[in-house]
């Protein structure tokens, strides 16, 4: 009985958010009409700062920082003939304890770590919405300790994370930008990896701002990251921006930076769209977790 009542209360709260969402859209359109939503120069620039990878040291039984220059060059050449397999996954972190019985973080995290991610057999895994609740669970996995370097041991709420196989990773960067941003901005993590045959690839794991009326911010975030990547990598390095884009309609494709192609459309030509969340969402839970 209590579970049923709790579910009903949760459903009512979700529909309440629908009305709040409609109100926010109205405010957004009014702001745009009066030019309040003009781009802020502080929001349109960022830079990539190099940070160390972390590898698991069995002698010390701990994760230790490991820069690219400290690694043996033989590690990079072992897999030159293999294709590069890249995966992206949003673990969908729930920050609302009153819906935990429905979202089931503990069961989902265990399934993600023991079934979904290891079975991908990916050279590079990009994760979104990683928290300090989930990360320690991932770091204990034997398949991670044995095969991968990881981009961080401590992460901000709903942050981005990259795992790279030891024979693929080179340099690692994190996006830094002005702290005065007025919206939720999750710094991208960018890994430089060997794609074989002497080709390098810069892979940016991103999670753009959610909700349909924030398309303006998503555009700024992509432009900012694109500029930072261009300033960091040479023209001979290929680029890939991957992750949860939170795009709500096909019209948002016009925010994709020049020179990039929509990989979803390249790989799924028979499927009409690849948007993250439909409007309105099919499930009320997406209002909480987007």
Image: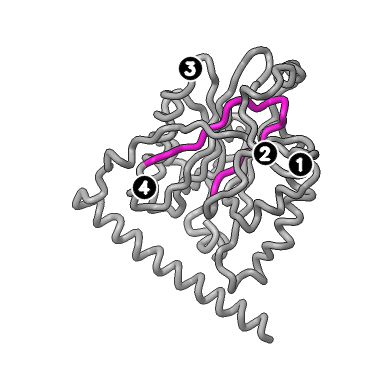
Q: Tell me the residue at 60%/19% (across/down).
A: 200
Q: Which residue is mark 3?
A: 234
Dot 2, how many residues are within 10 Å of its Cα: few (below 14), some (14-19), or many (20+)? some
| Viewer can see residue 38 | yes
Instruction: Indicate which disc residue 179 carries.
Output: 4
Q: Determine the CA span between mark 2 and mark 3.
A: 29 Å
Instruction: Indicate which disc residue 60 carries.
Output: 1
- Which of disc 3 and disc 2 is earlier in sequence? 2
Instruction: Indicate which disc residue 64 carries.
Output: 2
Apparent side of residue 117 relative to residue 265 in the rendered image (left or right):
right
Mark 2 touches mark 3? (CB < 8 Å): no
SS for callout 4: loop
Q: Quadrant of residue 102?
A: bottom right
Q: Which residues are magenta?
A: 159-177
| Residue 74 image point, x, y percent | 74, 17
Farthest residue, direction left: 34
Q: Determine the CA span between mark 4 and mark 2.
A: 28 Å
């Amino acid at each position: 009985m209590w579970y049923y009542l709790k579910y009903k209360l949760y459903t009512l709260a979700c529909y309440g958010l629908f009305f709040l969402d409609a109100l926010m859209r109205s405010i957004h359109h009014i702001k745009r009409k009066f030019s309040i939503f003009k781009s802020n120069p502080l929001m349109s620039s960022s830079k990539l700062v190099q940070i160390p990878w972390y590898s698991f040291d069995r002698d010390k039984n701990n994760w230790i920082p490991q820069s690219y220059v400290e690694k043996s060059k033989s590690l990079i050449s072992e897999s030159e003939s293999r294709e590069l397999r890249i995966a992206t996954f949003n673990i969908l972190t729930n920050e609302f304890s009153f819906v935990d019985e429905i979202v089931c973080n503990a069961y989902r995290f265990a399934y993600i770590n023991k079934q979904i991610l290891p079975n991908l057999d990916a050279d590079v895994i990009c994760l979104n919405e990683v928290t300090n609740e989930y990360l320690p669970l991932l770091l204990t996995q034997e398949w991670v300790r044995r095969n991968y370097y990881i981009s961080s041991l401590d992460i901000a709420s709903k942050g981005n994370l990259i795992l790279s196989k030891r024979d693929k990773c080179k340099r690692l960067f994190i996006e830094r930008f002005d702290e005065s941003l007025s919206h939720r901005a999750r710094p991208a993590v960018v890994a430089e990896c060997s794609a074989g045959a002497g080709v390098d690839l810069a892979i940016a794991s991103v999670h753009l701002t959610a909700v349909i009326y924030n398309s303006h911010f998503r555009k700024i975030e992509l432009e900012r990251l694109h500029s930072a990547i261009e300033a960091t990598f040479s023209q001979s390095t290929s680029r890939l921006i991957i992750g949860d884009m939170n795009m709500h309609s096909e019209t948002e494709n016009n925010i994709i930076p020049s020179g990039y192609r929509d990989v979803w459309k390249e790989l799924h030509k028979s499927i009409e769209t690849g948007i993250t969340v439909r409007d309105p969402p099919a499930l009320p839970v997406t209002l909480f977790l987007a």
